[in-house]
């Protein structure tokens, strides 16, 4: 097969000597992968590493016979359980034909290693896209994941049903052809009556695997429904859900409703996600078809194409995907920790005390200066200062000026600095002088109608008073990531 005494780096695909332990280019630990340019089975020339996990690696290769790019999956685990599961995966995929699933083209064994040749799906994974762009707009998430749900429904409709058991954002590829592909059937299971999961297939993905996949009960179609709900959760919030087994044991907080993280999520979509992610599988949707019907009940988006398991009615096919209105306040970066109302009020009180002391010092200093320059009695000057209400004027009019310039120059006043708060824009940048001045003007008008502008803060999910809303600023707590 023309094997060379070389091995590719799992991180950068650089060729290294076969005896090397670390990559000469990036220093990553080597895994005894095949060398770049190796021709397997006399047909598949390996180009680079697409991914490498604990039990296997996936290479980008060229099919020399057909001159096509393909993905070659290699099983690195020589245990009998893993070898049997890999062969099961090949048998599963070889029989499947669905536009949102990769096709198996070949399966062979070389030098004691198993190989699976599949369609190469160009494009990024859903996980990579959300990490780069942030949470997807709900209608876009529904568009992509409806295609995935069609593929899962197709798997579940087989006889016997096929359970994927590893649905997650990293296993969903968004191709340049406008399709979403569900990939990696490494721990898939053919559901037969009375069967239990093989020991070699009990892998879990924290955040996406349901409780029963940890061994608490046999897995079935509802296990994939939990993973679909968790994938939806990540797509529209940008956050990985808490691990299911920790939700069961009470080691973590309850699942945070998606709309508490991203208020732009429709209520119906939130309900679908929460029902799909119920810890008790009896409370989940009974089928993917039922989940799709519930999803379409509130978010009118057509299926990408008629699935082989169900045909939408003509009226559904003619429905158009509505465009969501451009949000006035888009979701905030994940590293933002919005300050609580009581902490902001406490900082405001500290600032008022600090400025009161400053106003008193300025008033006394002015009186002493006039007394010294005019060579008149200090108490006579002080009475003149009192009559002109100098202290009150400095206190009232100087306070917003002090706050505006402090926010513009340092993002925080003395009071905010003492409790670890600062004022920033929605992308974390300094607010600037004009925003700071506009914020104080808005605060002044907020105070007029019985402080309603400040009371608003207690109910607003972004904890913005009217002055923050006008200026487009947010008060956040300083974190190690945000400093």
Image (tube, rainbow, N blue to C red):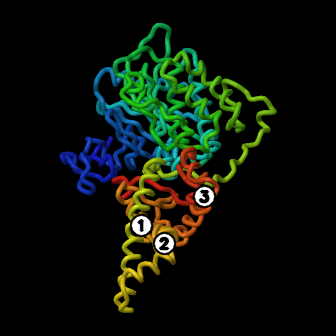
- Asked if the residue at tag 1 contacts the one at tag 2, i.e. Cβ–Cβ closer than 8 Å, the answer is yes
* Residue on which the image places disc 1: 355
SS for callout 2: helix
Q: Which sits in the foreground, 155 or 281? A: 281
Task: Say which residue label 2 marks.
Answer: 398
The answer to which of marks 2 and 1 sits earlier in the sequence is 1
Residue 412, compared with residue 340, is above or below; it is below
Residue 182 visible: no
Distance from label 3 to label 2 (Cα)? 18 Å
**Rendered residue at 35%/49% (across/down):** 37
The answer to which of marks 1 and 3 sits earlier in the sequence is: 1
- Identity of the residue drawn at 57% across and 25% down: 275
Drawn side of residue 331 relative to residue 187, left or right: right
Judged from the image, the secondary structure of the residue bearing numbered disc 1 is: helix
**Separation of marks 1 and 3 at Cα, in angstroms:** 20 Å
Residue 438 showing in the rendered view: yes
Residue named by callout 3: 446
Residue 251, horizontal then vertical, whole percent: 36, 27
Along the viewing direction, whichever of 357 and 135 lies nearer the viewer? 357
11 relative to 313 in the view: left or right: left
Sequence-first tag of 3 and 2: 2
Mark sitting on residue 291: none
Query: Where is residue 78 shown, x and y percent of the image?
Result: 28, 27
Taking depth in this image into account, of 357 and 50 the one nearest to the observer is 357
Q: Nearer the viewer, mark 1 or mark 3?
A: 1
Q: Quadrant of residue 42?
A: top left
Q: Residues within 10 Å of mark 3 (few under 14, many from 20)?
A: some
- Percent x, y of residue 169: 49, 39
In the figure, residue 250 lies in which quadrant?
Answer: top left
């Amino acid at each position: 097969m023309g094997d060379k005494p070389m091995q590719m780096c799992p991180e950068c695909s650089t060729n290294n000597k076969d005896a090397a332990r670390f990559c000469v280019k990036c220093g990553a630990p080597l895994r005894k992968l095949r060398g770049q340019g190796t021709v397997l089975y006399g047909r598949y020339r390996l180009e680079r590493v697409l991914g490498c996990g604990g039990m296997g690696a996936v290479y980008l290769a060229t099919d020399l016979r057909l001159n096509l790019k393909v993905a070659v999956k290699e099983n690195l685990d020589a245990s009998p359980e893993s070898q049997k599961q890999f062969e099961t995966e090949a048998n599963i995929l070889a029989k499947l034909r669905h536009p949102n699933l990769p096709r198996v083209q070949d399966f062979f064994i070389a030098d004691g290693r198993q190989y699976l040749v599949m369609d190469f799906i160009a494009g990024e994974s859903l996980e990579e896209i959300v990490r780069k762009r942030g949470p997807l707009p709900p209608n876009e998430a529904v568009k992509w994941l409806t295609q995935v749900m069609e593929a899962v429904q197709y798997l579940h409709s087989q006889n016997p049903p096929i359970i994927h058991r590893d649905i997650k954002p990293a296993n969903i590829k968004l191709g340049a052809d406008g399709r979403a592909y569900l990939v990696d059937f490494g721990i898939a299971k053919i559901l037969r009556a009375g069967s239990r999961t093989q020991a070699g297939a009990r892998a879990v993905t924290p955040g996406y695997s349901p409780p029963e996949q940890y061994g608490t009960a046999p897995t079935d179609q509802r296990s994939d429904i939990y993973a679909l709900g968790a994938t939806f959760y990540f797509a529209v919030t940008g956050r990985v859900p808490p691990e299911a087994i920790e939700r069961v044991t009470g080691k973590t907080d309850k699942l945070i409703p998606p709309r508490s993280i991203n208020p732009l999520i429709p209520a119906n979509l939130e309900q679908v996600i929460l029902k799909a992610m119920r810890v008790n599988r009896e409370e989940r949707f009974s089928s993917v078809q039922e989940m799709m019907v519930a999803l379409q009940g509130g978010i009118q988006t057509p299926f990408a194409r008629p699935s082989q398991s169900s045909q939408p009615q003509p009226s559904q096919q003619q429905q158009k995907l509505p465009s969501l209105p451009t949000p006035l306040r888009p979701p905030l970066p994940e590293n933002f920790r919005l300050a609580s109302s009581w902490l902001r009020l406490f900082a405001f009180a500290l600032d008022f005390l600090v400025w009161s002391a400053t106003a008193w010092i300025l008033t006394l200093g002015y009186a002493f200066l006039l007394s010294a320059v005019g060579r008149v009695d200090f108490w006579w000057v002080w009475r003149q200062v009192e009559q002109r209400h100098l202290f009150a004027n400095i206190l009232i009019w100087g306070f917003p000026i002090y706050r505006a310039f402090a926010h513009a120059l340092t993002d925080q006043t003395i009071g905010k600095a003492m409790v670890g708060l600062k004022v920033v824009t929605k992308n974390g940048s300094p607010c600037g002088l004009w925003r700071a001045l506009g914020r104080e003007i808005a605060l002044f008008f907020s105070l007029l109608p019985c402080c309603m502008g400040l009371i608003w803060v207690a109910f607003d999910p972004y904890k913005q008073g009217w002055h923050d809303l006008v200026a487009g600023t947010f008060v956040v707590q300083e974190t190690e990531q945000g400093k």
